[in-house]
Each structure stands twice: as C-alpha cells, then as structure tokens.
Image (tube, rainbow, N blue to C red):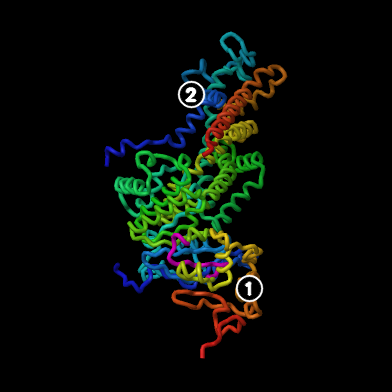
Amino acid sequence: MRESDNVPLLEVRGLVKHFPVKRNLLGRATSVVSAVDGVDFDLRQGETLGVVGESGCGKSTTARLLMHLIEPSAGTIRFGGKTVGSAALPLKEFRRQVQLVFQDSYASLNPRLTVEESIAFGPMVHGTARTQAQARTHALLERVGLDPRRFAGRFTHELSGGQRQRVNIARALALQPRILVLDEAVSALDKSVEAQVLNLLLDLKQEFGLSYVFISHDLEVVRFMAARVLVMYLGRVAELAPTEALYTDSRHPYTTALVGSLLSMNPDRRTEAAPISGDPPNPIDPPPGCRFHTRCPHAEPVCAAGVPGLGMRAQEHWVACHMGDPMSGHSKAPARAA
Amino acid sequence: MPERVNEIIRSPGFWVTVWRRFLRDPVALAAALVVLGLILMAVFAPWIAPQDPFQGMSLRRLKPPGTEGYPLGTDELGRDMLSRLIHGARISLFMGIVPVLCALFIGAAIGIVAGYSGGWTNTLLMRTVDVFFAFPSVLLAVALAGALGPGMTNGLIALTLVFIPPIARVAESVTTGVRSRDFVEAAKASGAGALLIIRKHVLGNVLGPIFVYAMSLVAVSMILAAGLSFLGLGVKPPQPDWGLMLNTLRTAMYTQPLLCALPGVMIFITSISFNLMTDGLRSAMDIKA
C-alpha cells in the first residue's frame, strides 16, 4: 500500500445529517429529524467494519452519506488522507473508489437494462470503451458465480434474488473500488443463499483487497463478517469495539441488550425477560443527554443531563456511556483514578 | 472473447415483449388496423378520392347518399361528400396527431426535468403548468385560438398549449417515482451526471407510460380541433375538415340528417380506434415482472 498503515482508508468525523420534516412558508426548516448526529469512525485498509442498530437508527443514512448520495449537514469524510469533494479528491474520483450494494436487489437494477448493460454502465461512465467494459462485465459475472453466457443478456425480473444480488455485487466491483458499503446486502435473501453470498463476499475481499462497511441488523451475520463492530442508537455511536470484545464484553447497556437478544444454542442460557422494551424515541424530538436513557435499566439523573462522550475504555474499545466515565458522576462509574 | 459473446442467450427486450403481447390482443389489433387504414387514406387522398373535393355545382346540392356517381351524396355546395371525407382525414388526423406530438416533446421535457430535479425547480415548473391546468381544456383551446385568431397554425399552437400541462403532469409523476428507485442512486454512485442518468436510466422507464397517455389525447385533440373548426376558429373553408363539414352542413340537418352525420361518424370511428389501440398498448405494457 502506498499510504502508511497509520492512515486509515476512510476517516469519518462528526458526520451529521438533519432532514427537515416541516417547513414554514419561507421554506425554512422548523422541525428536523437528526437521522445521523455526530458519527465518527475509521475504516482500515482490508478490514470489515460491521454497523448494527435498530431500524431507524441511521445505518442506511450513514451509508448514503459515505457515498455522498446525500449531502451531509456537517462533518468530513477523508479517503486515504484526502478530504472527499476537495480539489485533491473530486467526488467522481471518490465514487470510483467506494461503491454501494443495496438491500433491495430488484429496485437497485434498472428493469429496462440487461445484466450486461447494468454492470458495464459504471466503467463506461468513467471512459472505458464498450467492448472493454463488456469483457470486464463477463469476467466479473464469472467471478460472482454467474455464467456470462446464460446471464449477461437477461433482464432483472428473470433472475432470482440471490442471482440479482450477485449482479449487484458485480456491478459494484466493475469500477474496481477499494471499499464496498454493503447496506443490508444479504438481509433480503433466504438463509442458504445468504450464506453463499457471504462466502462470496469473503472471497472477493481477499482477491480484490477490498474493505467493507457491512451494515446489518443481523448480529450473527455481523459477528461472522466483521473485525470491528459499530453500534448505532438514534443517530449516534453507542459503542465501537473489536467484534469478540463487543459480543463477550459489551460496555454499553444498549449493546448488552442487543447481544442479550441473540438466540442462544445453549439451553442453560435461557432468558425469560425481554432484554429491552419499547420503541426507540421519536428522532424528531430525541431525549436530552444520553439518547438511550429512556430505555436504559441503569439510567440516573446524570444520563438525562449530559451527553456522554465516546471514550476509549479498553484496547480499541470505544463506548459512549456515563457508566464508563469516572468523571461523569454516575453511581456505577468506576472510581476516579488517583 | 468475440466467439463467446455470440453464444450469449439474449432475452427479448421490453418493447419486443410489448409488441408480441399487443399482437395477441384482437380488439387492439383491429383498432390499430383501422388507424393505419385512416392514415393511409389521408396520405393517398388525392389518388383515392373519386372527385375533386373543391369542385361544387349548384345543380346537385345536398344529394342523399346513394345518388348515382356520388355514393355518399353531396354537400351544401354540391361537392362530392366521399371525396371531401377522404381529404378531410388529412387535416383531421393532422390536427389530432401533430399537436399531441408537439405537446409530448415539450410536456415530457418539462415533466422529466421537474420530476428528476425535485425541490425548487419542480415547484416552479409544475406550479406554472398548474396555472394552465386550472382552465377546462375546451375553454382554454377556444380562448387561445380566439386570441391568436383563426387559422390552422393558430389552432395547432392552441391545441399544443392545451396538451402540455396534462402530459407534463404525467411525466413529472412517473419520473418522481423512478428517481427515488435504488438503481438511480446506484447510477449516481457510479459517478454519472444527471443528463446521462436521465438518458440511460430514466427515459427507458418513463417514456412508455407518457407515450401511452399522449396517445389517448389524440382523439381528444381531434375532437377539440373539430370543435374549433365548428366554431370557425380552426380551419377555414373551403378546406375539407370533418369538424368544419359538421358546421357547414348543420343547416341541412332537417332535410338530410344522414348526410350531416357522416363527418361525425368519421370522427367517431377515428377517435374510438385510437382509444382502443391505446388501451391495448397500455395493457400490453403492463407486464408483471
């Protein structure tokens, strides 16, 4: 790699996206949804970063912000040390490096184009000649496990869900990107096909030296795929830790509840009580302080008063919870170091 | 890999499938044949018509259909009805199809740009279009043609202006639907610009519905044009036009009712054929994927 290993491939700092939901007569937003509200993370070369959270926590918005499909309200994204959208890294060039695979394999392919046309479109946008783009398309189809002779001339409605998602992966790879953002890419597939596609993704990662941002609500799948996991709650980062640490030694009550909701293969580990109850609060009017305090079993007045910062609590283990911060005044916080 | 490319199994494209489905619809096919026949009749009118449509003779005025030498009779100036009806197809079809085609280009462009851009551009364009929408189409056509003055060109302009708003509305709504689909997002993510995305990803998905809608307006346009002619705002006599013929023959309504109805019958046949053909095309395009 040209860049030193110290520079992460992708650096996301203070990413914010507010969607106006109500406007006054002059078009000014009077009420906003803070879908993503201050997200920071790094993606390292060759790693898979899992992103988990409930519906509506801002996972998909984060994915679209990463791609600059929607403009962030605030925050910066740096790719290989260069700010995206600056003169050093124009948007079009960045988009060749980062590609997205959507959850809905049908809606993400143009029904009027053949598989070949869909995949070859990207390279041709970037100036590849048609014949060359077609050759690359056929090689990629072969690589994702679809015989180009049988599939290149087909339309999307003639393919199964798994086949379509393979086409979507091939389309994303056609620009030879460094990063794939997989937004619930396997969630709509049935379990056996899901496993095949996951294994394909692992192979492709090795072969093309890719890094993945793997967004899912399925904790088991994330555990299988990711080296590090980012837990989001209502547009904020709750916890960011190496996968095993997160699953065995979670520090944020929300993560603990999520991990606790996993079905266990061990009959001795039965859980009776629901680990977490209720719905997430309305993101138009999020609770003050820690956004999780309305559902947190350990909530104290301090949680509603102040926003917990994302602090490193162990090796590579970042948590945004007052209970981990000796300075917070939470009764369960560790004693202040002398 | 040229030899391999040749082996690729190619599925029939969307329009091929639509065409095959259309061919299997007997009603639509019959209607399409009638439309084709009318168009051929209009194109070859001078060769088909048995007599000169302008040559009148006061001795043989208002002969009923079936008269020797005049199978459909003669009009109030003694001109051969059959020849005038055949020639009338030229102007009537022209006034039916051309304003709709002009409105299709302009309206689709406005609607697609508005639908794809969204936001302020959409609001500005569509509210402007809505102003025209506020008037009943007949009233608008009459008012515009009246303001511009009688004549075929002015009638054409008036009808085009009448049809732009509804076509733009349809174009805007289908484009808005397509724009939010993931494949447009994916095309954006591959770095393509707006024009390329519209050409490659939007047009193919919206032109079909817009075209079908525009086709359904052809009959309306023809009838409106006939109405304008009837009011003296469209084609000027002695041009043979079905609407104008209805107007000039109405004085003979009580003496030769059958004769007076003939231009109306032609308008009826043409508009119902266009409508049935459009219906067939619409259902042929309604492919469940």
Residue at position x 62%, y 50% in the image: B130
Distance CA(mark 1)–CA(mark 2) = 77 Å
Q: Quadrant of the N terminus of chain A?
A: bottom left
User: Which residue extends farthest right?
Assistant: B254
Instruction: Pinpoint the chain carrying mark 2.
Output: B
Instruction: Pinpoint the chain carrying mark 1.
Output: A
Q: Is residue B272 visible?
A: yes
Magenta-colored stretch includes residue A191: no
**Nearest to the observer: residue A220 or residue B99:** A220
Residue at position x 51%, y 55% in the image: B117
Mark 1 lies on residue: A293
Mark 1 against mark 2, which lies toward the viewer?
1
Residue A205 in picture, x, y percent from top left: 37, 58
Magenta residues, start to end: A223-237
Q: Is residue A72 left or right of residue A56?
A: left
**Nearest to the observer: residue A44 or residue B228:** A44
Crowd band around label 1 with a 10 angstrom C-alpha radius: few (<14), some (14–19), many (20+) = many
Mark 2 lies on residue: B40
Magenta-colored stretch includes residue A226: yes
Residue A113 in picture, x, y percent from top left: 43, 43
